[in-house]
Image (cartoon, rainbow, N blue to C red):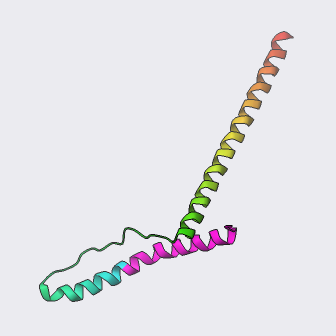
Amino acid sequence: MVTPAFFTVAAEFFSGAIEERDKINTEVIDAIDQTALSWGVKVLRYEIKDITPPVAVKEAMEAQMTAERQKRANIATSEGLRQSMINQSEGEKQKQINEA
């Protein structure tokens, strides 16, 4: 069972991993530059593009995204129902005015 605390830890892990990516990239560029210097090669850019999370973290992130989507869907449904009730009420009010 995945707990809310696990979501928090997973989110912190990945925000930290993403923030660390720039630091890691800089360190890798420096290391490659030192090695390639004797060849006359200058490394301008190196980027880590893919971080593969552990299965449990990936599942937790997917569950969080699903919960967020469900939350937005519930809000949209609620707003739609509210607007529908307002429209019906206004229609009834207009009907009473017209009948008077």
Q: Quadrant of the N terminus?
A: bottom right
Q: Nearer the viewer, residue 39 or 26?
A: 39
Which residue does the image show at 73% across and 30% down from the upper left? 84
Residues rendered magenta in the picture = 1-24
Query: Looking at the picture, does residue 95 appear above or below residue 57?
Result: above
Provide residue 24's location: percent of width, then percent of height.
38, 80
The image quadrant of residue 40 is bottom left
Toward the viewer: 50 or 29?
50
The residue at 80%/15% (across/down) is: 95
Left or right: 76 as drawn, with respect to 88 = left
Position of 80 relative to 42 (above/below): above
Residue at 60% in and 54% down: 66
Q: Main SS type for the magenta part?
A: helix
- Give percent across and percent down for residue 55: 53, 68
What is the tally of numbered marks visible in this picture?
0
For residue 45: magenta? no
Q: Where the C terminus falls, by quadrant?
A: top right
